[in-house]
Image (spheres, helix red, strand yellow):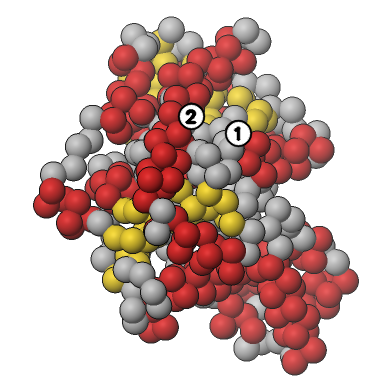
Amino acid sequence: MRMMLYEWDAFMQTDMEDVLCRMNIDYRVFWYPFIPKLTDEDAYFEKHFCDALVAGEYDAVFSFNFKSVVSKCCFKMHIPYISWVFDSPFGITEREDILRYQTNYIFLFDRYVYREMKERGIDTVYHQALAVNLQRLDEIKLSSAERDKYGADVSFVGTLYPSTFAGFRARLPQYELGQVESVIEAQMKIYGGYFLDSFTEGEMCERIRLLLEGESEYDKSFHEGLQSIIAKEVTRRERLTLLFLLSQDFNVALYSNKSEDMLSRVDFRGLVDSYDEVYRVYKASRINLNISFKRIVEGMPLRVMDIMGAGGFLLSNYQQELVEEFEPGRDCVVYESIEDAVMKAKYYLSHEDERREIAKNGHERMKKYTFEKQLEKMFKVVFDDV
């Protein structure tokens, strides 16, 4: 097999190349960072990419996340295009004709999004969990100095989602604002259920759309934009609340681009690189939090895979696919409310042997989700179909 990798600085790119070498798969990298995120037109790119495909005689093209201009080139050249999506929902063109190209093989980690697209009649999508380069992670060893540097009772790596909600709420009359706030509060209390899509397709959403009509930032894809604004606000409030409560009793470390005033007792440590340093955090922390972005409805986000792959202890919000693939209380710990999360954190911080055993079990179960095994599944779908 000979494969072209489209490179755009994705999180998992280096691991992908490492694993392809171990699998003895011949590949070449095509790097072009200038494609705007929301366009499917780039004549310069298309010419040079198609020329490279002809010259290289490739069996397939691969990229992380879906790139519509890459899809167009592969369709033109009759070459399978494999895209492994780690964002949810993934930001792609609204042109469904491009999604429907039969040369596409779009692998989605969130089963909810997969079902949604299949129901729209898009048959080029497949459901596939994400993966870790387990061999590399096992080779990362911590010195005593690194354990001191990265250690904490509880750590969270991720954004706090600087709120776009404040500007949005300022434009709403009191009644409509009250309706949106009630939806946010309800969604914060429900784990394993997602109803923001229903709200943003309903009558209240249409009333809000009419109120904001003519404001350019809300004109395009209004329903999708409103759902994103509300989901980010729900996620933001959950993350802030849980970090605040845990920091009252424990040493809590936050790795993010910025903190918040209410988290004055949280140890803000700035950003860490996603290739090496983040795994040292996961290995050194007694508890690692996963607080999923609410638009990830059922799937296991990359943070979940990375924590367990590094051998860290995972305390995660409920995700349907997580509890199907891993045993809560044995491989990881799952919470179903903010109060439940605080209670479970306190318990496992005082039961060290149980905590270590769960981390060990989670790491063992991650052997099912190595890059090698997940790529073999993908290649079977693609090349058995060609």
- Dot 1 crowding, Cα within 10 Å, few <14, some 14–19, many 20+: few
Which amino acid does the dot numbered 2 rest on? Arg
Residue at left 47%, top 59%?
A: 347
The answer to which of 360 and 293 lies nearer the viewer is 360
Q: Is residue 336 visible?
A: yes
Quadrant of the frame with the C terminus: top right
- Dot 2 crowding, Cα within 10 Å, few <14, some 14–19, many 20+: some
* Element on which disc 2 rests: helix
Label total for image: 2
Work out whether 335 lies above or below 267. above
- Quadrant of the rendered image containing residue 337: bottom right
Question: With 15 as the anchor, is 50 left or right in this view?
Answer: right
Work out whether 166 lies above or below 107. below
Question: With 157 as the anchor, is 200 left or right in this view?
Answer: right
Quadrant of the frame with the N terminus: top left
Q: Which mark is residue 325?
A: 1
- Quadrant of the rendered image containing residue 294: bottom right
Q: Are marks 1 and 2 in contact (CB under 8 Å)?
A: yes
Q: Which mark is residue 205?
A: none
Question: With 295 as the anchor, is 24 left or right in this view?
Answer: left
Residue 380 point in image, percent of width and height: 58, 12
Residue 204 point in image, percent of width and height: 83, 75
Q: Is residue 108 visible?
A: no
Q: Which mark is residue 365?
A: 2
Work out whether 32 lies above or below 253. above
Q: CA distance from mark 1 to mark 2?
A: 9 Å
Residue at left 69%, top 68%?
A: 189
Residue at left 35%, top 21%?
A: 19
Q: Residue reaching furthest right? A: 203
